[in-house]
Image: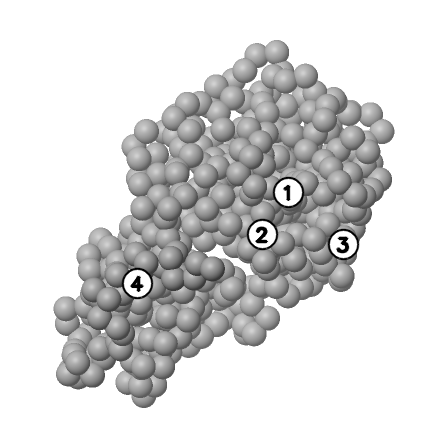
């Protein structure tokens, strides 16, 4: 399903609202997006952005996991939050890994597009949002970056935050391993690295590009093709030797010159604090192409949407990997409020030590969990109130808390030490098998009565 079909579908379901009045891309749109996100609200289409007549701006598309599931074609209406990964996302990835589909090169340049190669001025043509008060400028936040590793020509695709620094200059901050390796190799060879940024791509492609390469191990166009069950149509860029999605709303083409750097920052990042200024590689923009009535997509860099897109594939990977060693694990959840660095795991333990072994294992994981909590299967991992209750009723701090100092942490974590060094903490909130089972029994009304009342519920409050 392409982005425009998805927008239409969401609008029909009442999951996308249009803003008709004029709203400014500097701060104002982010204020609307933040409030909608806080209220678990719909996606938003700004029909009338100030300064960018004829353009629409899309926000909060993936701020709900259900919308992500819908966008990648797995039905999600009646599913509970805690089951989304196990029942929808895990089967999607499992099937995809065995059935990768190569992208299809579409001749003739694909859709009719506006192309700008002379007098380039990114902000004149692309309505890039400025999100947070101290942001150093406008940031492209939903840009799918495509490059090729210099010698092997293996494709590297990733969503990366980028700051517009000048009419034809964009600073870029690739952190996860694949893209920086390509940048570094090009620099060692003293070669420019060709880059394309596709903004406004199909939901299945967006999820694939946010899936960590080291976990999925596949070309992301092929992974997206597998999600879709048919090839992703791609076209060649105008000025660089890279394939981009034929239906992308905007494409920015350029090259990263070896050893050119610019200050990037500050910017509000997914830790919901500011990432301060750092010297970063720079893209020299060579061309901008866009659809005639282009829709620009923005993601709040310090919002749930960003964390959702990263957390879902990680939850799937962790569930998959952990179950190979600990088959009794039931669910894995990364609460979005903790920026994806907390992990809640539910399990049915057989031995007293099972829960601690799971904790040590997960805390040694390189994907940067900062705090982990293990709970029994009667606790809903996706409901913070339930986890909180398990902690207060099943934990003794001197027995159930493990601390591992001096491990790697996120460089964005403001509390981390030099180089991002961080302590990690695990809380074992499972029942101790050494304590009488009845002591842990949850108080409740009889099940049969509960069922009866549920059946009568709609009649109870009739006027
Ligand atoms: C909105 C958004 C912004 C992101 N910004 C960055 C970024 O600036 N730098 C980075 O390295 N990763 C960023 N990521 C994360 C990567 O896209 C993600 O970790 C991806 O899986 C990495 O792919 P790779 O493992 O193939 O490198 C961002 C993700 C999202 C959803």
Vertical order, 121 against 161 (above or below): above
Marks 2/4: CA distance?
A: 30 Å
Marks 2/1: CA distance?
A: 9 Å
Lateral position of residue 192 relative to residue 208, left or right: right
- Determine whether the residue tagged by mark 3 lies in a helix, strand or loop: loop
Label whose residue precedes the other's in the sequence (3 or 1): 1
Label whose residue precedes the other's in the sequence (2 or 3): 3
Label whose residue precedes the other's in the sequence (4 or 1): 1
Please state the horizontal and vertical placement of residue 366, each as a whole percent of the image.
40, 59
Please state the horizontal and vertical placement of residue 463, each as a whole percent of the image.
47, 60
The residue mark sitting in front, 2 or 3, is: 2
Marks 4/1: CA distance?
A: 36 Å
- Whether the residue under disc 1 has CB within 8 Å of ligand 1: no
Marks 3/4: CA distance?
A: 48 Å
Label whose residue precedes the other's in the sequence (2 or 1): 1
Q: Name the residue under label 4.
A: 453
Foreground of the two, 170 or 39 = 39
Label whose residue precedes the other's in the sequence (3 or 4): 3
**Residue 101 is drawn in which quadrant?**
top left
Foreground of the two, 55 or 322 = 55
Residue 41 - label: 2
Q: Name the residue under label 3.
A: 27
Marks 3/1: CA distance?
A: 19 Å
Q: Mark 1 points at which residue?
A: 17
The residue mark sitting in front, 2 or 4, is: 4
The residue mark sitting in front, 4 or 1, is: 4
Please state the horizontal and vertical placement of residue 205, each as a whole percent of the image.
50, 34
- Crowding at dot 2, Cα within 10 Å, few <14 / some 14-19 / many 20+, comes out as some
Kindly give the residue lying farthest to the bottom in the view shown.
398
Q: Are marks 2 and 1 in contact (CB under 8 Å)?
A: yes
- Whether the residue under disc 2 has CB within 8 Å of ligand 1: no
């Amino acid at each position: 399903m392409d982005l425009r079909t998805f927008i239409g579908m969401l609008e029909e379901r009442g999951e996308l609202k249009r803003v008709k009045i004029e709203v400014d891309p500097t701060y104002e749109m982010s204020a609307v997006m933040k409030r909608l996100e806080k209220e678990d609200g719909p996606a938003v289409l700004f029909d009338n952005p100030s300064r960018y007549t004829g353009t629409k701006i899309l926000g909060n598309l993936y701020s709900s996991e259900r919308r992500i599931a819908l966008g990648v074609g797995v039905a999600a209406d009646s599913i509970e939050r805690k089951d989304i990964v196990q029942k929808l996302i895990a089967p999607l990835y499992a099937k995809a890994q065995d059935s990768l589909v190569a992208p299809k090169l579409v001749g003739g340049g694909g859709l009719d597009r506006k192309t700008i190669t002379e007098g380039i001025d990114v902000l004149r043509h692309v309505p890039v949002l400025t999100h947070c008060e101290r942001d150093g400028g406008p940031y492209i936040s939903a840009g799918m970056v495509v490059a090729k590793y210099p010698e092997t020509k293996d494709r590297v695709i990733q969503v990366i935050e980028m700051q517009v620094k000048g009419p034809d200059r964009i600073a870029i901050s690739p952190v996860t391993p694949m893209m920086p390796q390509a940048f570094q190799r090009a620099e060692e060879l003293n070669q420019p690295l060709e880059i394309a940024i596709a903004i406004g791509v199909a939901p299945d492609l967006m999820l694939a590009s946010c899936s960590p390469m080291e976990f999925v191990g596949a070309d992301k166009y092929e992974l997206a093709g597998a999600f879709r069950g048919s090839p992703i149509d791609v076209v060649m860029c105008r000025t660089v030797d890279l394939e981009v999605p034929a239906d992308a709303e905007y494409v920015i083409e350029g090259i990263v010159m070896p050893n050119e750097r610019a200050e990037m920052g500050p910017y509000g990042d997914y830790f919901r604090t500011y990432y301060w200024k750092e010297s970063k590689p720079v893209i020299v923009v060579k061309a901008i192409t866009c659809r005639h009535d282009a829709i620009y997509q923005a993601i709040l860099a310090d919002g749930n949407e960003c964390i959702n897109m990263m957390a879902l594939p990680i939850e799937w990977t962790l569930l998959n990997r952990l179950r190979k060693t600990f088959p009794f694990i039931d669910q894995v959840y990364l609460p979005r409020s903790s920026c994806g660095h907390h992990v809640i795991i539910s399990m049915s333990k057989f031995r007293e030590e099972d829960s601690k072994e799971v904790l040590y294992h997960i805390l040694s994981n390189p994907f940067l969990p900062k705090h982990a909590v293990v709970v029994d299967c009667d606790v809903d991992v996706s409901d913070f109130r339930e986890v909180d209750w398990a902690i207060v009723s099943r934990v003794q701090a001197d027995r159930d808390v493990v601390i591992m100092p001096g491990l790697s942490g996120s460089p964005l974590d403001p509390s981390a030490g030099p180089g991002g060094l961080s302590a990690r903490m695990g809380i074992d909130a499972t029942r101790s098998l050494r304590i009488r089972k009845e002591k842990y029994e949850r108080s409740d009304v009889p099940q049969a009565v509960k069922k009866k009342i549920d059946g009568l519920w709609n009649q109870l409050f009739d006027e």
